[in-house]
Image (cartoon, rainbow, N blue to C red):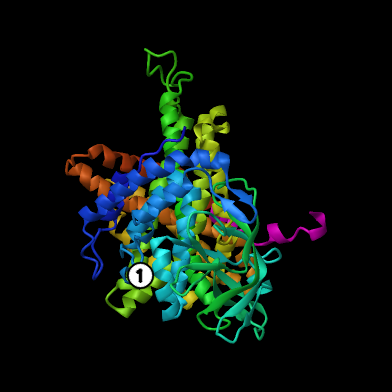
Amino acid sequence: MQTYTAPLRDMRFVLHELHGGEALPGREEFTPELVDSILEEAAKFCTEILLPINASGDAEGCVHENGAVRTPAGFKAAYQAFTEAGWGALNADPQYGGQGLPETVAKLVEEMICACNLSFGLYPGLSHGAYLALKSHGSEELKDFYLPKLVAGNWAGTMCLTEPHCGTDLGLLRTKAVPQADGSYKVTGAKIFISAGEHDLSENIVHLVLARLPDAPAGVKGISLFVVPKFLPDAQGNPGARNGVSCAAIEHKMGIKASATCQMNFDEATGWLVGAPHKGMQAMFVMMNSERLSVGTQGLGVGEAAYQGAVFYARDRLQGRSLSGTKYPDKPADPIIVHPDIRRNLLTMRAYNEGCRAMGVWVAGMMDRAANAATQAERDAAEEFVALMTPVVKALFTDLGFESANLAVQTYGGHGYIRDHGMEQLVRDARIAMIYEGTNGIQALDLVGRKLPANMGRSLRRFFHPVAEFIAAHEAHPALGKLVQGFGRAFGALQLASGFIAEKGLADAEEAGAAATDYLRLFGLVALGFMWVRMAVIAAEKVQLGAVDAPFYQAKLATARFYVERVLPQAGGLLFAIKAGKAPLMEMPEAAF
């Protein structure tokens, strides 16, 4: 049986202590007390409504019959409760019926949703992505018509990019859109791997579809974006006649089985242009970048659920005696939590999760600042930082979430491999997050190929400068100097790797490509290290002041030490791998594989 308790204490620490919790201009109404109450209610909803249907939804899966898709038992009622409570409207614009909460709060709620039921979370998650794309690039008429319905949740959204022959390389896209006399378009083509492409949760589904106009130039510069509803709206704006959109099949997948992953056909379906002709990628990337941060949050949610399940089992399972002598003489054996290797598993998961939570809120806070800061300079700086960190969050968080799920299975042993405890489902569910919204290898190429050289390296300095300033200010800390110095060595490895890639990559793109995945991992581990040493400084001060909940802060200090001394040394090995260059990868003749 899967168990989960929302980590509200750690969420409050990250929001109010680590990142300050100060309201952004115009957001003063969101006091810490209000935010805490929202998180508490979200935790209650997720654990009481979403968690109980997670394992059953996985076992039942979605059913495709006569072009319609039926979600597992309980999902429709849960979705109705979700929309009625306004959870899908948290960070949407009040102009369209949203609540206008900061991204920081929304991302923490997303984490809880994903920890309890990742499959369910995809449905409202895709709708929010569609909302963002339309809000950023849609006409006022499209926004006024569609956004209130998407925010309310009675209409759902999708993003339709991938085609059978065309995944990452969207320049190969073949779906076409033919203009009509009334200003609409007839969209024809086939899309695959469309999450939430067809389901029974909402009264209508709004597809955002990439397609080519008849005069489109070749490649990605010839792609336009269209809004294509499942049901054409009638004169009153309600779902009317069925559009030329159909689900041909659903995929039978390794995981997220309660999320409908559909093969969609568009047969002269009526759609409307979003944004300018041939500029569809600009609009879609608004949606995709938001989704990439959300997918990173999926990895964190699964990782937290895996950690909690593993801790529960490690306390309960009796096997062997402690290597340092019996700890529970009244029991036939000690619980496995006394064993060093089990503790390695648990501390690794804990360090990943709490580090990712801190980093995720940092990036989400910059998203808020990019939208709401007082000056254009502040907004630009925040936007550059978010752009730099998006591929790191997406790839690192999902890598670590999958790793945590596997460590949880290992902690359970044979009991983790069977379905009874739900750990194997977490492994299966977590695996897709490393693939969709751009594989993690693509994220690494984005980081080294686009983000590092962006703005003459200025984007990279948005991260490097605060890290260097922190090290200079704290490397002589009376209690934590050694910890900060250890972090500083890892940061030094990142600086050397960045210089190596900048030098080699300019001359040979394959050198940068060969280093990309290792570099992203190095960057991510150092970013988590930055979070951990910052958290350690705060925790040490609280312990010294005799905080009421001192055990919480003492655990922070212990986990920070574990991360810096047992995980972060990987930075050195990654630097050596990067400096080996492309030769070990590229010198093998293709025929020899």
Q: Residue at x 38, y 62 (%)?
A: 152
Q: Which residue is mark 1?
A: 96
Residue 417's quadrant in the figure? top right
Can residue 309 be spotted in the picture? yes
Q: Residue at x 46, y 73 (%)?
A: 134
The secondary structure that most of the magenta stretch takes on is helix
Residue 188's quadrant in the figure? bottom right
423 in relation to 291, above or below: above
Q: Residue at x 62, y 45 (%)?
A: 254
Is residue 229 or residue 125 the one in the foreground?
A: 229
Q: Residues within 10 Å of mark 1 (few under 14, many from 20)?
A: many
Q: Position of residue 135 (x, y in %)?
A: 42, 73
Q: Position of residue 256 (x, y in %)?
A: 55, 48
**Relative to 382, 586 lies left or right:** right
Decide whether residue 591 is among the magenta residues. yes
Q: Residue furthest right?
A: 591
Q: Position of residue 225 (x, y in %)?
A: 55, 75
Kind of residue at disc 1: Tyr
Is residue 336 or residue 195 the one in the foreground?
A: 195
379 in relation to 190, above or below: below
Q: Which span is picked out in magenta?
A: 574-593
Can residue 536 be spotted in the picture? no
Q: Position of residue 576 (x, y in %)?
A: 57, 55
Q: Residue at x 54, y 53 (%)?
A: 433
**Relative to 164, 330 lies left or right:** left
**Relative to 227, 128 lies left or right:** left
Is residue 126 or residue 425 the one in the foreground?
A: 126
Quarter of the figure with the C terminus: bottom right
Decide whether residue 547 is among the magenta residues. no
Residue 187's quadrant in the figure? bottom right
